[in-house]
Amino acid sequence: MYTLRELATAISGELHAASEQAVIEHLLTDSRKIIFPATSLFFALHSSRRDGHSFIAEVYERGVRNFVVERKFDHSSFSDANFIVVDSTLHALQALAAWHRSKFKYPVIGITGSNGKTIVKEWLYQLLSPDFNIVRSPRSYNSQTGVPLSVWNMNETHTLAIFEAGISLRGEMEKLEHVIKPDLGVFTTIGDAHSEGFMNIQEKVREKAKLFTDAREVVFCRDKKDIAIAIDHIETAKKFDWSKGGNAKLNVQEIQKNEQSTSIKMHFKKADFEVLIPFTDDASIENAITCCCVCLSLNLAPAVIAERMQLLQAVDMRLQLLPAINNNAIINDSYSFDLNAFQIAIDFLLQQNQYTRHCIIISDLPERYTADHYKQLIAMVVSKKIRRLITIGPKWKALHIIPDQQNFLLEQYDQTEEFVHQFNTNHFRNEAILLKGARVFEFEKLVQLFDKKVHQTVMSINLTAIAHNLKEYQRELKPGVKLMAMVKAYGYGSGSAEVANVLQFHKVDYLAVAYADEGIDLRKSGIRMPLMVLNVDEAAFEAVVEYNLEPELYSFEILQSFIAFVKHQGIQSYPVHIKLDTGMHRLGFEEKDVDELLEILKENKNSIVVKSALSHLAASEDPGEDAFTKHQIDTFVRCCDRIAAVLPYTFIRHISNSAAIFRHHEAQFDMVRLGIGLYGVDSAAEHQLALQTVATLKTTIAQLRMVKAGDTIGYNRRGKVERDSLIATIRIGYADGFSRNLGYGTGKVWINGRLYPVIGTVCMDMTMIDVTGAEDIKVGDEVEIFGPNLPIQQVSQWSKTIAYEILTGISQRVKRVYLEE
Ligand SMILES: *Cc1c(COP(=O)(O)O)cnc(C)c1O
């Protein structure tokens, strides 16, 4: 807790204060995340797309009175608020965190590397918690703003801090180094992912290693040449290196993988010791060795390390929204109860507007939390307007919470068993439920209560990747260009409400759906943004108006009948969109129609308002058709110019779809329409954007059998077995959207790191795979149909179609699971 005056001095800002004695406890960088307005300090940060200064009025409205702003901002109209004026709000945030950091003398561990940062951080937390009271980055907060916000959580009660740092550009690590100032550094590993901002791998490693400029000691793997060279350059730091080659401080002598565990034999300070970890994959083994080094550096005895290593738990930082019984959904988050982590989970819960109610089920917190912490959590629940809270455990009960809100439902149980015993499915309906349980409360039992039993084919949708892809495209936009996101066809198969919620949260300008029904569903799910409907018919007009949907009008018939409808209803100035056909020849007015169109618009200027004029490109992704695309664009400009000459107001012009956004910059006009790119598919061949995979379709192996040479597999005996073969039957078929074109070896699936071909025909609900030669394959193993290991573009080539058809063709019986990282 600091006074505003202290903070202003710390960041060398000019203080314009109504009350200098204001005290600050919380930092705020996102206007959507206000919880404790009175004690928060809002930093008006800006990115290429958004300027935090434009949210100040809104943040002020919601009770915040303390702001850090840049010089250009005119704060004269906020007379009862306090402003610290600085040159750069981002630098000020970092300087503030660095200043706060400097007040603490306990050890700080700083972790970087391309992979494994979060796992190593979480494992160190698991390993060191018995000895230290640890503050750590929430989830994977490791960016230019995430690091300062993490460091701000340090306080006197802690005895160790663990922060991760990630960078994507040159020059960024120096800034994070100032903030973290690690005593002990950890370099996990280096891969070639996310290299865009760097010339080559050596440069990337050197940049990352800047985190350790002032470190006392650095842990790294000597076998990774690039890392070793970069760390050896840092003269001041001691080196805590490990190697399989026998020339390091800690030497790995033998790694033996068992069924479900791995034993690692090591040599340290003239003594041998061995640890057993409950993982068998190479990345986990490396991460575990790295953690060993850190523990040794902190003087833990090898025997203690070995004892704790056995108990390491898998780290899943992602929040998952799982469909549950009675149209409920659950988010099971057993991650930390720290305020930041709790807030991230609540924000994800509240983004699920498609549910009528939001509920939290929370257990007692682990020992180290104080009564004060419970009160802060309650304050957060109340301030976020969550109306239903269920607590499990005696400590919550002993607090005697009396909610001062109306319609606040509070239920309290002593134990998980008691809740399970009294559970009645009818008490939960159409709710999004956040489960927040400390491990000893075994909330897995609650997950089971809510679980919807369906067959084991699941499409997981990574909502964080959607937000990432959105940003990739936004970077391509010229200043001021708006963005309409296409969520037609059930969000390209990914789920309309879930995807639309993410887009609403990230403030895209418009959404578009194909039919009125889809728009109505979105409205019922709490989507309040402007919504365009591509294809309306007369029968839907009433619903269109009732739900405030904006129709695209594409012919004289539909235009006239819509005008007649609004007139009859006595409606004025209803927003509509005019579709122009510039060469696609699907829907729209042609150039020759424009005069007649304008006559009608003029005559009916009181009834309808043209919000936008749009057209659609037929081949924007195809370099061979660029001349045609140019012709379409020219036609569009001519038509728009004629409309603009007549209409007394301005309207939005848009023609670009995903591929056009970066292939035809000149065609961005006032808005673009982003479709397939949002879902992680680059429809153009150039692959200029670093898109992330959004949809992963997985199933499982139902049965395995040996089949003798000469036998046949499946319907009509179409799969001939030429040698003795091992055949796996997987739980997916053409009724799920797994095309019959993938039969007879054309299509492949990914199991445990390898691709295996389909054998015989694809059946309705099942498919047989030739897994001959696969070792350690078993019934129940996961099978990836498409996803990070098997790109959907590859599958669409095998199926002789396009990714659009595959995505939209995954049937509704396939359960969707939503992830947020
Ligand atoms: C589907 C659609 C888009 C989006 O196209 P993508 O290639 O998926 O980006 C844009 N405009 C219209 C009219 C569409 O129907």
Image (cartoon, helix red, strand yellow):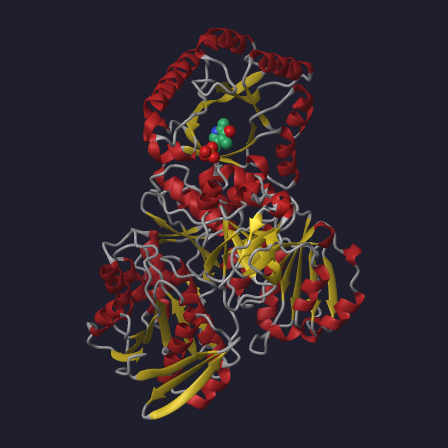
- The vertical placement of 67 against 510, above or below, is below
Q: Is residue 239 left or right of residue 675?
A: left
Q: Quadrant of residue 119?
A: bottom left
- Residue 738 to residue 432: above or below: above
Q: Nearer the viewer, residue 558 or 419?
A: 558
Query: Residue 688: horizontal and vertical position, in percent?
Result: 33, 42
**What residue appears at the point 36 percent right and 21 percent down from the top-left corner?**
628
Q: How many marks?
A: 0
- Image position of 279 with respect to 50: above or below: below
The extreme front residue here reads 710
- Quadrant where the N terminus sits is bottom left
Image spot of residue 516 (x, y percent): 63, 29
Which residue: 58% across, 36% down? 489
* Residue displayed at 39% across by 15% down: 641
Q: Nearer the viewer, residue 328 or 372?
A: 328
Answer whether residue 238 is visible to the viewer in this image: yes
